[in-house]
């Protein structure tokens, strides 16, 4: 694997996380996945807990969503007035990750934007295949829009964001709510290196199929878990690059250059612009998929958080 194009800080961070991973059993990508989740997520948990700014209030709250109690992590950088809110959906291929693995990222956004961040701990696949996670995330956004004042939130100023599979769920949530709740007006979508299509043959898949953390083999596994019925992988709410994107709110796309998903992210930018959506987009050179977890270690991650903070302040008003 050539690392000639890697940002030196990205290279050092990746080596550090690989070293931490050696303390855990190897990740086996086959159900049941409980042990694999512990190995996959474990190396980053201490990083997430220790990193990021401290909040005036951080709490776990529970919502009755689709027949179960769904945990939401709520971060508020200040408590003296209602705050605009971003519902931030964590990544992990719909299979891994949690509100704990992404806690430092959520707090980073809350601090940079001066907004509250609500992170839903949605059901993972393959135990909960498409569309359960999507429907849960949409239900959380509906609850915030109707009842967010109970948590010190401004229900009129909501952004939905996410990274990787969470970016997929973020744009799919907006598409679903566009149809089911047309009066629920989102202020924006923050889409970090999202999964936007089920094709695995794009130029970036060919270029970065192996050796760059997120591989084509892993993405094949994630799609089989999330959408075991092949027909569902073509559904516009599973592969939103195939959707009618008209009427979506302003979007900020952050793209990792050395990522199998780079091509579909650039395609999503084009499709959004063609649909008349206001788009800001930045490609970060030399970084890998998932680089946001490297805040305080990789300057590109810090720049991405700061840029998103400025954008969030603008669209939230």
Image: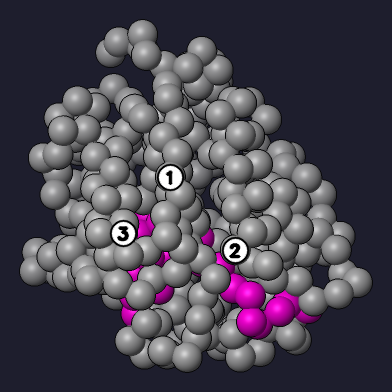
Task: Indicate whether 153 appears above or below 192.
Answer: below
Magenta region includes residue 186: no
Q: Which disc is residue 281 wearing?
A: 1
Q: Residue at x 63, y 34 (%)?
A: 302
**Compared with residue 300, is residue 199 higher up or lower down, i.e. above or below?**
below
Task: Characterize the local packing of mark 2: few (<14), some (14-19) or many (20 or more) Cα atoms within 10 angstroms.
Answer: some
Reading the image, the residue beneath label 3 is: 272
Pick the quarter of the image with the C terminus.
Answer: bottom right
Q: Is residue 87 visible?
A: no
Q: Secondary structure at mark 2?
A: helix
Q: Crowdedness of circle 3 by 10 Å Cα count: few (<14), some, many (20+)?
A: many
Q: CA distance from mark 3 to mark 2?
A: 17 Å
Query: For the N terminus, which image quadrant?
Result: top left
Which secondary structure lies at badge 1?
A: strand
Of residues 144 and 283, the one drawn nearer to the viewer in this rendering:
283
- Residue 175, by quadrant, is bottom left
Direction from residue 126 to residue 77 in the image, left or right:
right
Q: Position of residue 276 (x, y in %)?
A: 32, 65
Q: Indicate whether 107 appears above or below 64.
A: above
Q: Which residue is mark 2?
A: 315
Q: Residue 148 location in percent, x, y?
A: 68, 83
* Magenta highlight range: 152-176
Front-lying residue, 102 or 259: 259
245 left or right of 165 in image: left
The x and y percentages for residue 182 are 41, 89
**Mark 2 to mark 1 CA distance (whole Å):** 15 Å
């Amino acid at each position: 694997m050539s690392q000639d194009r890697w940002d030196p800080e990205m290279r050092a961070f990746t080596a550090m996380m690989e070293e931490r991973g050696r303390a855990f059993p190897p990740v086996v990508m086959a159900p049941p996945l409980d042990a694999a989740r512990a190995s996959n997520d474990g190396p980053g948990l201490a990083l997430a807990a220790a990193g990021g700014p401290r909040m005036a209030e951080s709490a776990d709250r529970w919502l009755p969503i689709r027949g179960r109690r769904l945990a939401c992590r709520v971060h508020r950088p200040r408590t003296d007035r209602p705050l605009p809110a971003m519902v931030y959906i964590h990544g992990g291929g719909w299979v891994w990750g949690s509100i704990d693995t992404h806690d430092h990222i959520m707090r980073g956004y809350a601090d940079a934007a001066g907004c509250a961040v609500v992170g839903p701990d949605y059901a993972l696949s393959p135990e909960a295949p498409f569309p359960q996670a999507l429907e849960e995330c949409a239900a959380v956004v509906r609850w915030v829009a109707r009842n967010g004042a109970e948590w010190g939130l401004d229900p009129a100023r909501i952004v939905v964001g996410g990274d990787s599979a969470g970016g997929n769920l973020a744009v799919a949530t907006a598409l679903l709510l566009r149809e089911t709740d047309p009066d629920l007006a989102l202020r924006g979508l923050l889409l970090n290196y999202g999964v936007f299509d089920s094709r695995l043959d794009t130029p970036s898949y060919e270029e970065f199929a192996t050796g760059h953390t997120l591989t084509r083999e892993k993405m094949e596994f994630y799609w089989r878990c999330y959408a075991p019925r092949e027909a569902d992988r073509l559904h516009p709410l599973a592969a939103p690059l195939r959707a009618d994107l008209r009427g979506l709110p302003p979007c900020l796309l952050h793209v990792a250059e050395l990522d199998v998903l780079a091509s579909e992210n650039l395609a999503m930018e084009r499709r959004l612009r063609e649909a008349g959506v206001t788009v800001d987009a930045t490609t970060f050179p030399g970084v890998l998929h998932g680089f946001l977890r490297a805040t305080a270690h990789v300057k590109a991650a810090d720049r991405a958080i700061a840029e998103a903070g400025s954008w969030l302040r603008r669209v939230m008003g």
